[in-house]
Structures are given as C-alpha cells and as structure tokens.
Amino acid sequence: MHRSIVISFGFHTVMIILTVLSLPFLSKKPVDLSPLISIDLIQISDITNIPFAPKAKKIIEKIKKEKEKLVSEQAPPKKVKKENPKSVSSLDDKMKKIQTENPKAVSSLDDKVKKIQAENPKAVPSPDQKLNKIEEKKAEAIPLPKKKIEKIKMTEEKKQNPEKEDIKKVEITEEKKLVKKDTKVKQVSEFEKKEMFDLNKIAALIDKSKEEMAETIKKTNKLTQSQDKNMNISGLTLSEEDALKAQIFGCWSIPLGLPYNESLLVKIKLKLKPDGTVTKTEILDHARMNKPGQAFYKVLAESALRALRNTDCIPLEVPTTGYERWKDLQLNFDAREMLGGG
Amino acid sequence: MKKIKYLIFLLFITIPTKSFSLIEVDITRGNLTPLPVAVSPLSYNQKSKLALEKVLKIEDLGAEISKVVENNLKKSGLFNPLIKDAFLQKPDIAHLKPRFEDWALIKAQALITGKVDLQDEKLRVEFRLWDVLAGKEMLALAFTTVPKNWRRVGHIITDKVYERLTGEKGYFDTRIIYVSEKGPKTKRIKKLAIMDQDGFNTKYLTLGNELVLTPRFNPTNQMITYLSYFRNLPRVYILDIETGIQEVVGDFAGMTFAPRFSPDGKKIIMSFAKDGNSDIWTMDLENRIIKKITTHPSIDTSPSYSPDGKYITFNSDRSGYQQIYVMKSDGSKVKRISFGNGLYGTPVWSPRGDLIAFTKLHKGKFYIGVMRTDGKGERLLTENYYQEAPSWSPNGRVIIFYRETKSDHQGEGFSAKLWSIDLTGYNERMVETETDASDPSWSSLLSN
C-alpha cells in the first residue's frame, strides 16, 4: 500500500516537473511595457494671472528698458492711418487713371527714380527691395536679447552713410525730395518701415483719393427711399450685410474636427463702436459651454470668439451711417455648411 | 382731468418711436485651413538639462518633446505648427507669461509652452495651452514618469491639446499592430510587429517562422488575436503581449480566420470555414463556449461589432456578389446595406458608431470608403491599384490601411506600406515603418 503511494507520488511529481519545463511560454521573454504615467492637474483661472518668477521679471524689465532706449534713439514713428484693402486697390486704379490722363506726371517721377537707381542702385532702393530687407531683419529686431539689438544698430549705421553720399550726387530737385523722404524713413524704427514704404509709393495719391473716396461715400450715404425702407425692416442693406459677412468669413477658422451631423449654432451678441471696434461679446447660450457633453459647442464658440478678436478683421469695416442701427449685432455662427452637413 | 391724463397716456403709447430691433447676421462660411499653432520648445533649468542629458543621452529633451507634439499636430491635418525661427519670445519666459501680441504677430492662434524637470530621477513635464487672441490660458497639465517615457509624454500632450481645440478625443498616445513583411513576394517572412502610432518604438512579437495575418487588439490593448498556422491549418490565436502566452482559439475541425474582439473584450468573433461554407462564430473567452451566429450556405466573413456590441457588420456573397450586411449580435435581422456597383468587403464599425469603413473593388481598382450604418452616404476616400484592411483610430476620425504597389513580371518592385487618411479624404499620409507592412490595427488610447 505505502509502496504504491510512494510510486504514484514520485510519478506525478516527475510528470508535473516535465509539464512545467515543457511549457513554451516560460522560455519567452515578455514584452516590456512602458510604465504608467501619473498626471497632476494644475488649476486654471479664468483670467491669466500667473505671478512672474523673480528672474523672469528682471529679464522682462531689462528688455523693456532696452526697448525704451532703442526707441528714444530713433525719430518718433510717423502716425499712419491704416488703409483698408479696398481703398488701396482703388488707388491703384486711380494711379492708372492719372497715368492715362497725364502720363508725363507719373512717368517722369518714375523715370527719375529709375535713373538714380541705375546710377547708384543703393541710393533709392525700391519699396519692394526695402520690404524684403525689413522682413529679413524683422526676426532680428526682437527686443529680447541684447546682442541682437546691437546688431541692428550696426546695420543701420552702415546703411545710412553711403546713402547720404549718394544723395549729394542727385541734382534734380524732385529727386532730392524723394531721397530726403527716404532718409527720413531710415530714422524710423524697423517696425514702422514696412507700412511707410507702401505709403510713400502712393503718397502723392493718398490725399486726392481720400477726397474722392469721401465724395463717393457721401454719394452712397444719400440713401434712396427704397433703401431706407429696406434698412428699417432688416436693419442692414444687403450690401452692408454681405460686406460684414465677408470680413468675418476670412477670419473665422472653423475647427475641422467638428462633426458635420450635429446641430451646432453659436449665437454671439456684439456691441460695436462707431469705428467698428468690438467692445463687448456675449455668447447667448453661454451656459451650454460648460455643460458635460458639449465639448464641440465650446470649441465652436471659442473659434467664433477668436474670429471676433482677430486683428485682421477687427475693427470691422462698418457702414459710415446709422450707428444706432448696428451698434448691437447678433452673429449666428453656423459651420454645418462648411463641414459637409446642413 | 382724468380723461386728459388718459388721453395723454394713449397718445404717448401710440406715437411711433424710433426703435431698432437687434440685427442678426448668419455666418455660414469660414476658413477651413489648419489652425496655426505655435509649439514653443519646452524649457528647463541647467541642472535638469545636464541630468537628463546624462540619463537619456539626448542633448535637448525639451526641443525633442516639442518636436513630437509638432509632428503629431501636423500629421493630423487640423493644425499648422508654425516655424520656430519666427518665434519672438524665449521658451522659459513664454511659459511664465506669453506676450500675446508677439505670438499674434506671427499669426499663431494657439500657443503651447512647457517645462521639463528631473525630480527624484523622475521626468516631470509641465505644459500650458494658450488662446493667443483671447490672451487666456486654456489648459495646464503636468506629467510625471520615468525619463525613457518621454515620447509618450509628447503624445499625451498632443492628445490633450487636440481634445481641447477640437472637442474630440485624440489618437496620438496609441499603438499600431501590423504584419511586418520582408523578402521577395514569393517568399515573404511575416512577423507580428507593434509600434507607436508615429512609427517609433517598433517591437516584434513573433519570430517569422509561421505565417501571421490580421492581428487585432482587444479593448485593453493587452491581448492580440490573429491568424496563424497550426498543423498547417490556419487558426485563430490569442497572444498576451505582457506574458507572451499564446493559445489557439476553440477546437474547430476546420479553418478559422478574420478574428476580432467584442467591444467588452469578453468574446472573439471570427469566421469558420468548412466544406466551402463559411459562417460567423463567437467564442466566450471566460467559459470557452462557442456559438454559431450565421447559418446561410454562403461565405460570411470579416465580422465587426458596433461599439455598443448590439450589432455586427460583415460581408457575404449571399446575394451573388460580395456585399456588406448588418445584423443583430445574436444573428437575427440580417440586412444588406451596400448596393453600389462593385464588390464590398472588410467592413469595420467606427468607434464613434456612426460610420462603417470598407474596401471596395470596382473596375479593377480598390477603394477605401465609408458609409453610414444604414448604407446611405457612401463616400470613397481613396483609390489605388491594391489597398485594403481599414482600421479606425480610437476617435473615429482617421483610417489606417495598407497599400501594395505593382510588381513587374519578375516579381521585383513589390512593396506594401501602411497609409492613413482622415474622414475628409484630403489628409492622406504614409505611415513610417521599419519594414514593409500590412494588416494594420489601431489600438485604443493607452492613457484615458
């Protein structure tokens, strides 16, 4: 009896050992999985109010001082009113008009500038060339690191000297005027140059065109009775509404990940200043933004608000009359059409 | 007197006053260009920099993590990461308080800043997402992990940013399992391989002795089911990635193939072929009970569950041509949903539940497309000489598949590569792999 138990026990033990050793997975090296990552959440306030680190504060103050220094060394920047793209394009047309009416007036100036350029290409760089130069330098002109600011100063000095010599060579009075204007531009900060060159190119035409523009605006402002009626009913004329839409279309980046089949419509109430500046924005269904499961709505609402803060569109080009009519606006942002639904 | 007062009051309310109702303007169009995002390199102090350099042998870990984020965002097609050379503010200062006007100047609409630190031999990565135009912070998180996990941290940051800016979950902290292929077309060595969704950290799970096909993840990403050969018979296997244990699924007296896990991971659904007939079966992984779902005398294969597990889509030639069908998970109420020209196959239910991805063969060309679950709204996303096996990203926005190129009559020039395309059909990209690759399957998010 005992003997058979011992034999049985021994046999089973051998079998178990054999089974364990022959199992294939024991010889395999398990794949090492990457360890878990713990996540800490940082609290976010509604308004950014992060205290400066003492070191960062010092650096920023230093930069500010340097920036002030740099500005004080330069001539005060010329105040230039931003022109809307429409008026610029109309200016080009007008330039063409002037050219056709009196080709000598414009061509003589151009010819003279070309002459100077041919004699000494550095003397009167074309606005385009200058723009390129500025754009190249713009990255360097960050008022952050000390060294870079010094670099800019150096390049400015180098540039100014040969040009002064070139100016002396110019004899014709008109040409002198042009060059003088150019030297003035050089004293202005790098950031201002881009705009100023654009304007110098058409400087002679601006005032004239403004007058003409004003005249045309006056003409359009004289509304017919039918137009007036239309406004009272719908608030904005079709052309005014289209113009307003076109501006916002360009600045509204629709979040591409939004589902096309969900009904997402964001209504925003605006308060506008007479110059088109947005003073207040209010999402009409604001409570929905913070509701669970409304992430897409929140994303769409934020994108709409971004459009209304985009400096490419704001201030809006608003009608010149009837401020009382459009000082309060409601914009309904609906992305369905663009996302393939609707 | 009272009458006069009453008359004045009446007169007052009846006089037309000049009042304007609120003007409503419908904005129905906008930019569909990717959102410009500035991903500032992550900053760190000198002490952490030296320590991390020593541990990871990476010179600038902050820049490397930001590169991972940048690449992910770019590949999504929804964002346009701006060139770093244009940044005007230093990363450390930007992380403390960005000068929004500087970032707006370079047309950035969102800004990502961050900080890397080494604390008690653990990597701590902090990041903040800013709305540049609103001048507000949108998101701030910190992650702590072992230093060698830095790439995953980059993916998790991208997921969080993606979710905050699009409203849907990301798909960057995920893996892809596929069949790695090497050698000439007639003598291919096929191995199971697993990698991060961006093509990094490839690991091989099998040696290449046996032919392997159609690997699929389970919902927890710890198990894989795939087709391999057992005693010269194609059979469905399960492999535990962590332990390396693999086993044959079920004791079928025939060929089993096209396996897939159920959404709860408790069942495997697959095809079982015998005597020219192929049906769909399920096996319960807890009690190993098998169940026949379809009984039609035709070829029913490629089953895929809906995300709620209530329905199954599959393809069948019961109508005479291979088409896509939907049925209840118990096999009842079978309904054909594809009616277009050509043959339809490999249907896969989207994780969102709204669409079914499929492969279509029409006039000698292969298409990857999507249709709604009722078969309506068919959209063909991409067309090629040979492509198939679509698999959804966990957020149901991107589809990965493989594409083969033509070989010449000597069998040269053949290649198989993984490709991805999003639902718009515009953002088509090749997914980098170490070798040729086929049969991809996307995991769910590793960090939820």
Image: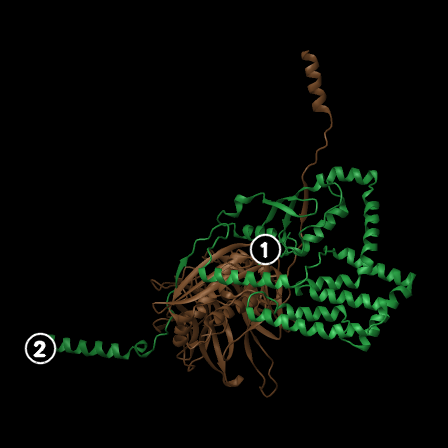
- Which chain is indicated by disc 1? B
Residue B427 placement (x, y as % from top left)? 60, 67
Residue A244 placement (x, y as % from top left)? 71, 49
Instruction: Give the Cα separation between the discs numbered 1 and 2.
Output: 90 Å
The vertical placement of A159 against A203, above or below, is: below
Q: Disc 1 marks which amino acid?
A: Leu
Q: Secondary structure at mark 2?
A: helix
Q: Disc 2 marks which amino acid?
A: Arg
Residue B405 placement (x, y as % from top left)? 59, 79
Query: At 31% from the left edge and 79% from the top edge, which residue is drawn?
Result: A27
Residue A227 placement (x, y as % from top left)? 80, 41
Q: Secondary structure at mark 1?
A: loop
Who's brown, chain-wise?
B
Q: Which image quadrant for residue A323? A: top right
Residue at the top extreme, as displayed: B1
Residue B106 appears in the figure:
no
- Which chain is indicated by disc 2? A
Which residue is the site of mark 2? A3
